[in-house]
Each structure stands twice: as structure tokens, then as C-alpha cells.
Amino acid sequence: MTQASLLSGITASKAAEFGVSYPRNLEPIIVNSGISKGQLRSAAGAVQIGSGPGIDRAAVNWNDACYRVMGSQLVQVAADGTVKQLGDVGADGTANLDYSFDRLIVRSGTRLYYWDGVALKQVIDTDLGVILDAIWISGYTMTTDGKYVVVTELSDPFQVKPLKYGSAESDPDPITGLIRINNEAAVLNRYTIQFLDNQGGSGFPFANVGGALINTGCVSATAKCLFGNTFAFVGSSRGDALGVHVAGSGSAKKISTRVIDDALSAEKDPTAIVLERRVSRDELRLLVHLASETWCFLAKASEAAGEPVWYRLGSAQDHAYRPRNAVNVYGRTMVGDVKSPALGTLSSDVSAHFGEPAEWMFDVGMIYNGGKGAILDSVELIGLPARGDAGVAFMSVTQDGVTFGPERGISTGAKGDRQKRMAWRPHARVRNYAGIRFRGYDTAVQGFAACEVNARGLGA
């Protein structure tokens, strides 16, 4: 018997290239179980608890309460999912939320609003201009229109003085976003990132931090988020292809692999990429939301494995990942939905997304007998069957890395049938090499620790 790796498999492309295949809706966990040194487990599902006035666009925990932009409305969501509409902020464009000591800052489309706990008011000062991104820092609301960095008045956050405009002057590339890190403002440009520190004075109060310039930039205001003690972003240096990076001191560390880079380059609109951070169960996750699927980077697992650990997230079969804008509040992780007005909480007890099954899939490494061929007698998945609803696991085999043969399904065990063995007897001839794929589409919670393959080598 040979044990095949589960954490990442191998497939081939039509461009004559072997490549890593990452699991879908199964999160890799680095754990020495005695069976193997890692396992795959169903990614947390979303349980609906309520409904809002529209599609979810942004969320934040402010003063121990959940605030979201849903459709055109700023809303407050209670612990039981009850939604209170606070005011209209417009339904066009992206949105983001930040807060000061006494105000919630709402950027919706190209407009700026404040919620003070009583009333929602828009900033209508014409000197503000259009808003591509907004943050709070050192008592100021800081915004950008893509050319300038603008701050509101300390004494009146509804007022802007044009003599207090600033800019990122290290490179003529356009400004794409802002983020606050260690009480400094990181001004993200398309090909560079510059840091500003509050120096005060009668003019623009922020000054460039010498030696902190990063020569890699970000594609848009949505393609960045706080990550650990720094921030992550999607972007590139001038003339380079897109990648996923984590900002360091005067540099950026690339964490995306060849497969993720290919997915980024295939995006028709890279400015629509959205990054999101989730922290729970001793894991720091970075979600890179693309148009058709989401890639998830696991920081703790990558550190333990000594290499980047990624997996894919999606809803239904080959649909975009629905649960978004996770907020840890009320002792739970609350999420919205990009397909419907649903509100929910993430739960490791389910795998479905708002009641809809989410397809899981993974490949294992190639079986090869030095070109002599083999007979594939048996394949068995070792793990934790019959946790939750009953499910079916399908197995198929490829002998060219691209096309897969007929699927053979077996039960993963009815609820409580924890001694269930998930084994196939394909008795298939392997002419040169073969890969194995497993797939399921149900509401069961899956856990796999190993794949045991029994193959008889053929003679020369």
C-alpha cells in the first residue's frame, strides 16, 4: 500500500505542464494524527440567521455591534440577525467601513458619510472630491481620489481645505487605496506603496516616512486588507505580473504560487479583486475573492508546513463563494451573502452555504511505476466518516492529467456510522501514470487524513 498526499495533488494542463491542484472547500490542517501529518476537513459553512435589504457590500464591528452596508442601506445587525436600517448610502460601487472614537465612517461608491449613533449624514464639501477609499487615522478622515490624499479638518470632519491636499510623490503611478498600519497611513499606488506619518503643521499634516517605500503596488482599494501585524495586497511592480503579497519593512513578500498567479492573470477586471482576513481556531486566513472562485491562504499551516498552503472556496458547483465580509461579533463570526440578502454565521458543524450544498474536490499525486504500468487494485480514503449528514464520495481516474474517466460513488456513512470504510476496487490498468480525483456534492461534513493506494506493478 502507498499513501498519497492529500494537501495538494497534481494534474496536467493542455499546455504540456504538470501543476499543483489545490483542494476545493476542504481546508488543509497540519496535524500529526499517527495516520499522516495532515488532513483535509470541510471548510466552515454558513447558517442563515436573518435577511437584510440587499446584497452584502461591507461590514465592521464598531462598539461591539455589527454594522453592514447591504444594498443601498447602512444597517445595524443584532445578535439574533434582526436588521435595523439606519439610512441610504446609495447602491452603486464598492463600499468600506472604518470608525473613529465617536463616528462610523462609510465610503459608498464615491461618497462619504458619517453615522454618529443618532443620524447618518453625508459630507458634501465640494473640496472633498470623489472618494475611492477612506480610513480614519490620528483624528482625521483620510480619503483619496486617485491623485491626491485628502484629510478632513480635526475640528470639523465635514470640512476639507484644499490647501491641505497631499500626494504620494515617489512615483507618478495613480493612488489606488489607503490602509492604516501602526498609526501610519500606507498610500497604495499601482506600482509602489508609500508610508505617511502625522507631523502636524498648518498644511497637509502627514509627511513621507523615509526608507519605507515598497516598490510593489496594489491594483485597487478592495485588493488589500490587514493581515497579522501588517497587510496583504494583490498587485505588482511596474511591468510585472500580478501576485499576492504581504508588506514588510521596505519590501513585499510574495506568497502566491504559480497556480494562483495564473488565476490572477486570467481575471478580466483585476480591480474587482477583493481581499478579506479571517481569524479563528488558531488559523490566520487570507481570502482572495475572484470573479468565479476564492483562494484561501493559511498563514499558520504554511509556517508549519514550510511552504505556502492554499485551497479553493466556492459555492454550489463552480459558482463564486457566497459568504463574505466576516465579522467576529457577539461571540460568533457573522457573514453576508453576495448572491442574496441573507445574513448568517460561519459554523464548522455544517458545510452548506446558506442551506445550499457546496461541492468539495481534491486530487492526489500521480501513480507511476517507472513507465512499466500497473494495475490499480484498491483505493481507500482514511478519515472521519459519518460526521453530520450522509454523503457520497465519487472517485475518478486520469491517465493523462487532463481528462478523467467515469466516476464511482460510495457512501461516506450514515450519521453515526463512524466505522465506515471508504474504499474502491477499480481494478484499472495504468499504462504509464495515473492521477486520482475525489469529489462530493452534499451537506455532509468531511474529514480525510490519508489516501491509501494499492497498485501492482507490471513487468517491463
Image (cartoon, grey):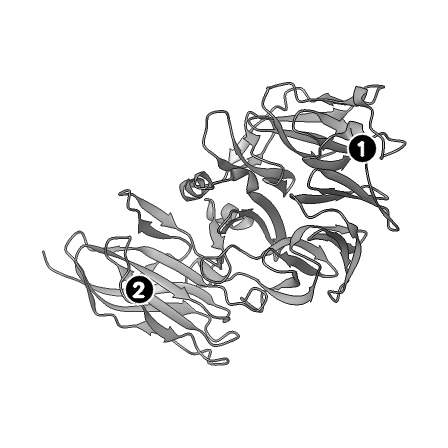
Q: Give the residue type that dot 1 points to.
A: Ser
Q: Quadrant of residue 406?
A: bottom left
Q: Position of residue 447 (x, y in %)?
A: 47, 66
Question: Can the viewer see residue 179 in this picture?
Answer: yes
Pointer 2 residue: 396
Task: Identify the residue at horizontal 53%, vertical 55% (top origin).
Answer: 321
Residue 217 falls left or right of residue 426: right
Quadrant that contains the C terminus: bottom left
Q: Give the residue type that dot 2 points to.
A: Ser
Residue 408 falls left or right of residue 111: left
Q: Is residue 90 above or below residue 431?
A: above
SS at mark 1 in the image: loop
Question: Can the viewer see residue 151 in this picture?
Answer: no
SS at mark 2 in the image: strand
Q: Which mark is residue 176?
A: none
* Crowdedness near tag 2: few (<14), some (14–19) or many (≥20) residues, C-alpha within 10 Å: some
Q: Which mark is residue 138?
A: 1
Q: CA distance from mark 1 to mark 2?
A: 57 Å
Number of marks present in the image shown: 2
N-term mark: 1 or 2: 1
Task: Identify the residue at horizontal 55%, vertical 25% (top origin).
Answer: 215
Q: Position of residue 434 (x, y in %)?
A: 25, 57
Q: Is residue 66 above or below residue 258?
A: below
